[in-house]
Image: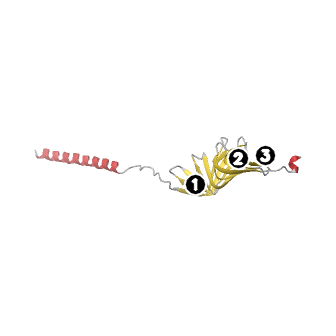
Amino acid sequence: MRDRLTSLIAGFLLLALVGSTWWASDYARRSVPVDPPRRLTHEMDTFIDNFVMMRTDETGMPAARLEGPRAEHFPDDDSYEVYLPRAVSQRPDRSVTIATAERGRMDQDGDRIVMTGDVNFRRPPHQEEPGLSIQSEAITLHPNEDVAFTDLPATVIRGDGSRITGTGMRYDNASRQLAVASDARVTIAPRTPEAER
């Protein structure tokens, strides 16, 4: 009888130990999150000095490049803020375009670059076409489509001195077409004697 009582007490203590261990484990698992929720604040997690990001085409040739002396990465929207950015589109079958600004923001997996602050978008002379320069306070670039646009006032200056001012512009480098949304004013430079020959 005494052995039976000792066995029952030992079994009860073992069951109590197993039950309390299970309860403590379950309580700890519920009260302490294993994977804390992602922070929604826009805080930098990484910075890069002498930042260069290059995109290649399907053949492996460089198609577009974004560079600047410093870039900061923000994990909440996977964006990069670039200081003094320089964005270059250099596809072999199209004109080279170069955009510079005071600040730039690349997001949407590199599909959009928003340049702000004294933006200058240039297309140097190509074959028989004169150069082109678009100036505005903000220009959005879509490197995959090779398109630049703005909804703000902008000034376009062609290499021959002709000028277009207006609000809202879109330039497609693939087709080399420029569209002005509203308030367009055009100043055509006089032809030089060399151009008339």
State the image coordinates of residue 89 (x, y, percent, origin top left). Answer: 68, 48
The residue that disc 1 covers is 81
Indicate the secondary structure of the residue bearing disc 1. Answer: strand
Say which residue appears at 13% left-offset and 44% top-offset: 4
C-alpha distance separating marks 1 and 2: 32 Å
The residue that disc 3 covers is 129
Say which residue appears at 61% left-offset and 49% top-offset: 113
C-alpha distance separating marks 1 and 3: 34 Å
The amino acid sitting under disc 2 is Ala
State the image coordinates of residue 197 (x, y, percent, origin top left). Answer: 89, 46
Indicate the secondary structure of the residue bearing disc 2. Answer: strand
Q: Which corner quadrant of the image does residue 147 belong to? A: top right
C-alpha distance separating marks 3 and 2: 22 Å
Q: Nearer the viewer, mark 1 or mark 2?
A: 2
Location of the N terminus (image quadrant): top left
The amino acid sitting under disc 1 is Glu
Say which residue appears at 31% left-offset and 49% top-offset: 27
The residue that disc 2 covers is 184
